[in-house]
Image (spheres, coloured by chain):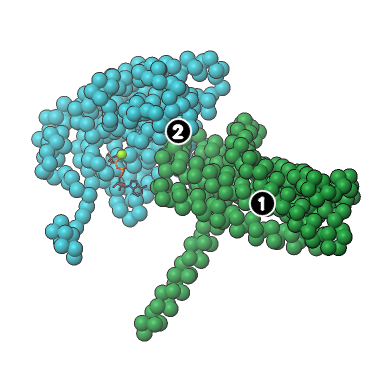
Amino acid sequence: MDQDWRIVSRIRHIGRRVLDGVARLGRAVVFLVRLVPGFSVMATRASLVVQQIYMTGVLTLVIVLVSGAFVGMILALQGYNTLVRYDAQSSLGLLVALSLVRELGPVLTALLFAGRAGSAMTAEIGLMKATEQLAGMEMMAVDPLKRVVAPRFLAGWVAVPLLAAIFSAVGILAAYVVAVSDLGLDGGVFWAQMQSGVSFTNDILGGVIKSVVFGLVIGWIAVFEGYDARPTSEGVSRATTRTVVTSSLAVLGLDFIMTAFMLRGL
Amino acid sequence: MDPKPLRAEPLVSVRDLSFYRDRRLIFQGLNLAIERGKVTAIMGGSGVGKTTLLNLIGGRLIPAAGVITVDGEKVSTLPRRELFRLRRRIGMLFQSGALLTDLDVFENVAFPLREHTHLPESLIRDLVLMKLELVGLRGARRLYPAELSGGMGRRVALARAISLDPMMVMYDEPFAGLDPISMGVITKLIRELNDALGMTSIVVTHDVTEASAIADYIYLLDQGRVIAEGTPAAMQASTAPEVRQFMGGLPDGPVAFHYPAGEYLADLLGS
Ligand SMILES: Nc1ncnc2c1ncn2[C@@H]1O[C@H](COP(=O)(O)OP(=O)(O)OP(=O)(O)O)[C@@H](O)[C@H]1O
Ligand SMILES: [Mg+2]
């Protein structure tokens, strides 16, 4: 009898969690739809968006540069170590470029962006809500969705692809330096293999599409969590954590799905 | 012929308003009218719903029943665009100030001007400095909200509330946290703005002395409805026990000091 009850209450608990999750997702979709008219800031107040791109860019640029350089150098060392067994070390440039452009650039940039700029976006919007700044704007007949939320969302969407491109470029340069100076490869071969092997439509465009999707998803999660946060210090801190966790998982899951489709040539 | 029938109508009228928070009743059958060109004080104990009432008038909350009209428009059914147009003509001083923490004092006061007008920078500068001079903070224009004291922040919020020269200003506790000198200045300022610019003012306050000094008409709220109304003189002279209790600041009487709760002793004994 007691046992039964425990099972029932556990199932009920699971059911409630699932319902909560579905309800949140529903709210997030409604929120995104309500946000769309705010995209007109792009046309009317472009400076607001540019300012946010600058802010998020400054937040994330250094960490993207440093990570990109390290990942590139690591790829060069590891790739060389494997390729040299098959006497294929001349393809190192190609290996590094493909890894970065197709996978690591978009994915790692997105993860870094979520942790650095996404969490900041959530905290900022959540705090503005908690301190009645958003309510105050509404009473001043200023739509916070348009004035505060849309510029941040759009900025994230634009910044992620740009940062991913920077990540890949820095990574390739760093790999080149390691390959030529440390591993003793020929620089010309490094570039030539890359140039002939990397396809614009498949590889580069695929990577760009990925990072555009990641930018959209992270921006969406970050601003939604901030706007939906309970207006307390605890509510904001929880929302910030949720942004990082949810958007990291979303990035990895979406990456798997998109990779599966892209490799099948869709 | 009826000369100017609109003027006779109150600027804000609240009829049979009911409002709930979760399931708890905040207002039931509330009726009041804010006359044009007058300073109307809304008084009542902490938690009776004064701030809630201002938010209902501003259209941020939707009543469960009843009608609120502002300048002839039904606030709760107004489409968003129209509602925003109406709000441009209403200034509100939030109880918490609600200043934008990323902007300095100058930019906070300039915010409504930048959002709603296309005035040249030099004109915005002059307008902002004029408003800041009125509240005595022209010299503080480069400070950020975090660097202001509570009373200073409130005065900046006041300057921002009037920066578009609205037809009506709602002041939520404008005197809280002010020293006696600023209190006198702000009282005079509210009165002068009201009379010189032909504004209508709603002042929410606890402070009986200030309300009597500033208001043309006072509403006293308790338990979700208006329990007394009248001119300050009439209120002071009233013999109704709840009015005497509030105006005299007496602890005992028909107006409850406590948030609704169960039996005290039972609560302490933990049953
Ligand atoms: N966001 C909210 N959610 C739930 N209940 C709320 C909320 N805001 C206010 N309330 C409740 O509504 C009631 C009225 O609150 P309100 O802020 O209007 O009081 P007030 O008259 O302005 O008080 P004070 O003079 O202390 O500012 C309070 O009892 C409060 O518990
Ligand atoms: Mg209040």
* Chain A visual colour: green
Depth check, front residue: A139 or A99: A99
Residue indicated by mark 1: A108
Q: How many marks?
A: 2
Picture layout, residue A27 above or below residue A65: below
Chain of the residue where label 2 is placed in the rendered structure: B
The answer to whether mark 1 is within 8 Å of ligand 1 is no
Q: Is residue B149 left or right of residue B208?
A: right
Specify the label residue A226 is tagged with: none
Name the secondary structure under disc 2. Answer: loop
Q: Quadrant of the C terminus of chain A?
A: bottom right
Numbered disc 1: secondary structure: helix
Does B206 sit left or right of A240 as displayed?
left
| Residue A160 percent across, percent down from the top left | 66, 45
Q: Nearer the viewer, mark 1 or mark 2?
A: 1
Q: Which chain is cyan?
A: B
Identify the residue at horizontal 35%, vertical 45% (top origin).
Answer: B66
Residue receiving disc 2: B101
Which amino acid type corresponds to the residue marked 2 in the rendered image?
Thr
Quarter of image, res B267: bottom left
Label 2: few (<14), some or many (≥20) within 10 Å?
Answer: some
Give the residue drawn at x 47%, y 45%.
Answer: A126
- Tell me where residue B111 appears, x and y as whole percent: 49, 27
Tell me where residue A221 appears, x and y as whole percent: 57, 51
